[in-house]
Image (cartoon, helix red, strand yellow):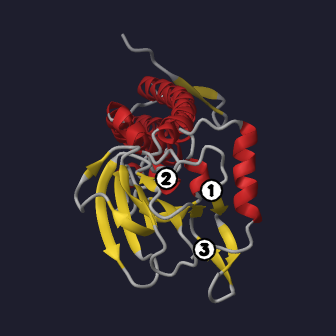
Amino acid sequence: MSKVKYRYNPETLSYDRIQKGFNYYFTRVSIYLTSLLLLGFVLYFIYPYVFESPKEKRQAREIQQLLSQYDIMNKKLAQVESVLEDIELRDENIYRTIFQADSIPKSIRRAGFGGVNRYQHLEDMNNKELVVETARRLDIVMKQLYVQSTSFDEVVELAKRKDEMLRSVPAIMPISNKDLRRTASGWGYRIHPIHKIRKFHYGMDFTATEGTEIYATGEGVVSRITNEVRGYGKRIEIDHGFGYKTLYAHMSKFNVKKGQKVKRGDVIGFVGNTGTSTAPHLHYEVIEKGRKVNPQHYYFKEELTAEQYDKMIQISSNSNQTFD
């Protein structure tokens, strides 16, 4: 049974019974509906900005875990980069030096990735700077690993050919010079014997009587034989492989033919006075990878003491004039 409600009437000083008609109930329902709508609006539009839902809390934890994993990954990448840098230093300064292989430029080892933006698909992420930088570092490490792997393949092949390389490197004097008295003029600026001008001498001269034997200073193949009226006169060039060539000039006679294989110590010809030469002697050059180099650095197969080696350099340096 519903309760009967009364309202005090000050005019009659009595209580009047409240009549609940349509307007009464309509008003009450409207108030309730409006309150519900307002509460729903608050919950739907404002609550999510103030309070995190369970799903958002779970996603926040996942994001934090991913950030932690990226941080760990970057620290491990730093360790890999450090180890890889040490391997590259060993490769350049030990392995490739031992086998006299060309150095790999840093521009190749550290080469980036030009052209199309490889990380465009990552730029819409909230933490794009971290993600893109990690992806970039990983790509560079992968590229360095590939270059280093290729380098080691080359070094392995050079190691397999080490004995052949050691036989091929020009490593003795081209004539018998035990007492070093045949050392005449060395590498550097000298006075030209004919033109009497200061000119760079790209080799070493050895004085000897005409007909003195000339030796191949390393294993190789005779790649060139010429007989010129001027210049080098009778000349032999030997291709030793591994980037080395040697040149023997002003000879009197040849003892080999073009294309012939020779070994270190083989007699390839005899000292002469041909071409632009003022006296019987041998002009000797060492060419490494297309560049003429000082021959005195390639006599490590000679049994010279430190004092004898210094004496040879002194003799060749003091000469003020060449023979060619």
Kind of residue at disc 3:
Phe
| Front in this rendered view, residue 55 or 170 | 170
- Give the quarter of the figure containing the N terminus: top left
SS at circle 1: loop
> Percent x, y for residue 123?
42, 52
SS at circle 2: loop
Kind of residue at disc 2:
Pro
Residue 115 shows in this picture:
no
**Taking 94 as reference, is 58 left or right?**
left
Residue at the disc numbered 2: 174
Relative to 279, residue 204 above or below: above
Residue at the disc numbered 3: 323
**Residue 182: which disc?**
1
* First of labels 2, 3 by sequence position: 2
Report crowding for label 3: few under 14, some 14 to 19, many 20 or more residues within 10 A (C-alpha). many
Q: CA distance from mark 2 to mark 1?
A: 11 Å
Q: CA distance from mark 1 to mark 3?
A: 13 Å
Residue 257 shows in this picture:
yes
> Percent x, y for residue 270?
41, 60
Quarter of the image where one finds residue 201: bottom right
| Front in this rendered view, residue 34 or 143 | 143
